[in-house]
Amino acid sequence: MKKLFVLLAPIWLLLACQADPEAIYFGKDACHHCKMTIMDPKFGSEIVTNKGRVYKFDDINCVHSFMAESQLEPDDIRHLLVIDFSQPQELINAYNATYVLSEDLKPPMASNFAAFSTQEAAKEYLDQRSGELMNYQRMLARLD
């Protein structure tokens, strides 16, 4: 029995420290920054640290504020994810997303940003609305 434990302990430790994204449970999970219940499946984001800690947010604005106020370093982040506006509840890589800034958007914390997995999807959204396309860096600059 002792040998079995010695053999399985490293596997158990690896599984316990996984740094994988988690689903956001709308209507149940709370935003780590503002503490509001995350309700809208078209908005939201998540940080997963290298140690496997998961922080969930209701708006990209809350992620930005959390990052500015926390002692979490960029090197500590394994995943920075946002919800794809065109595919509600689908988490995508925040750094690769295309963002739309539009007064027509009504995110929970009034950032007026939505994330899209492709530039084509973002452009399709803007075909019928006013707004501006931007990448992750430009979006962050606008939130500052």
Image: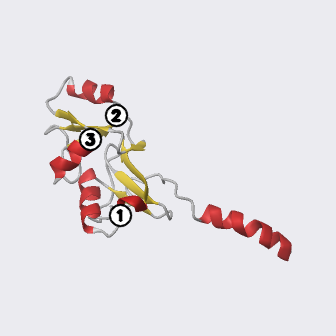
Q: Which mark is residue 20?
A: none
- Where is residue 133? Give x, y as percent: 21, 33
* Residue placed under numbered mark 3 in the picture: 114
The tag on residue 73 is 1
Kind of residue sitting beneath label 2 = Ser
Identified by mark 1, the residue type is: Glu
Question: In the image, 128: left or right of 58?
Answer: left
Quadrant location of the C terminus in the rendered image: bottom left
- The x and y percentages for residue 124 are 27, 24
> Observer-nearest residue: 36 or 3?
3
Of callouts 1 and 3, the N-terminal one: 1
- Which quarter of the rendering shows the N terminus? bottom right
What residue sits 84% from the left and 76% below the top?
A: 2
Label 1 and label 2: CA atoms lie apart by 30 Å
**Residue 38, percent across and down?**
33, 56
How busy is the neighbourhood of tag 3: few (under 14 within 10 Å), some, or many (20 plus)? many
- 109 sits left or right of 76 in the view: left
Q: Say the numbered circle drawn on residue 86.
A: 2
Q: Are marks 3 and 2 in contact (CB under 8 Å)?
A: no
Mark nearer the viewer, 1 or 2 = 1
